[in-house]
Amino acid sequence: MKPTRGQGAGDHKEKKRGSARRLLITIDGPAGVGKSTVSQSLAKHLGYVYLDTGALYRAVAWKIQQLKSDPNDPIQVEAILSHTDIGILPQTDGIAIQIDGVVVEPGALRTPEVSQLASTIAALPRVRAWLLPVQRKFGEACGVVAEGRDMGTRVFPQADIKFFLDADVTVRAMRRHLEFAQKGRDQSLESVQEDMTARDRRDRTREIAPLYPAEEATIIDTSHQSADQVVEQMMKVIADRL
Ligand code: DC
């Protein structure tokens, strides 16, 4: 039988606010599909906390980059993990990540190099195992929207509601390209799409916790929908469960 939230040890954590149940909601999908915007907006709508798990993988990648370590050498990666403290600090518009007591500047986590490196180290079983309890601990909070690649399949199989967002790669690349341009980063559309395709391939084909929709996930194609429309669609699914 699949575990359901609220059974066993987690019972005492199932609090209620007013008459509404506080749910654990997962949102998975590939890069550039609009997960972060939608997850943040949904969390705000519901008054829930938002967990951006990609930021955790990015933070580990960032530390490996800072130390100029080899991400393909398991011994070096293990040595780094065993000397790393990671903390998640909820903010009004998301989370900040603390590494070894210092908050990592959010822009440093979103460079193209860190994006590729995060996807590379995310394929390492040791890194995934190390981050698993960190994510699950945060998921114990009442009312969480957790965003990533394996939220519904591996980290929170007991989630109350699961969504999987998808969109055409050309649309996703265009969105990311515009987002970069707004931030003053000059990366051609072609190069953004190449990076995205490489990352997708790694994320979908890795042996451990690859990206795929959980069996019970509601799949939403965001190619031709605004973030507000996607959130509205999600709220209809969620309304029945509150
Ligand atoms: O969501 P993002 O683009 O910030 O994620 C960065 C990388 O981290 C992504 O390419 C794959 C990895 N990741 C993962 O493997 N599992 C997650 N739950 C979240 C991210």
Image (tube, helix red, strand yellow):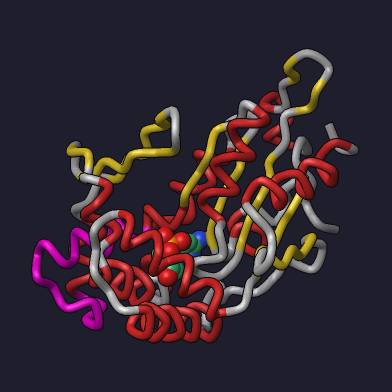
Residue located at (67% from left, 27% from top) = 13
The residue depicted at 77 percent of the width and 61 percent of the height is 217
Query: Closer to the camera, 216 or 175?
Result: 175
In the image, is residue 67 part of the stretch drawn in magenta? yes
Q: Position of residue 149 (x, y in %)?
A: 55, 65
Question: Is 97 displayed left or right of 153 in the figure?
Answer: left
Give the residues drawn in magenta, as a range: 57-75
Residue 213 image point, x, y percent:
70, 70
Q: Which residue is painted at 81% across and 57% down in the image?
A: 2
Q: Residue furthest right?
A: 240
Residue 199 at what x, y percent from top left?
42, 79
**Taking the image as four quarters, which one is ligand 1 found in?**
bottom left
Q: Is residue 128 visible?
A: no
Tell me the chief SS of the magenta region. helix
Judge whether 219 appears above or below 190 on screen.
above
Q: Quadrant of the C terminus?
A: top right
Pick the front one: 93 or 149: 93
Which quadrant holds residue 87? top left
Rendering quarter of residue 9: top right
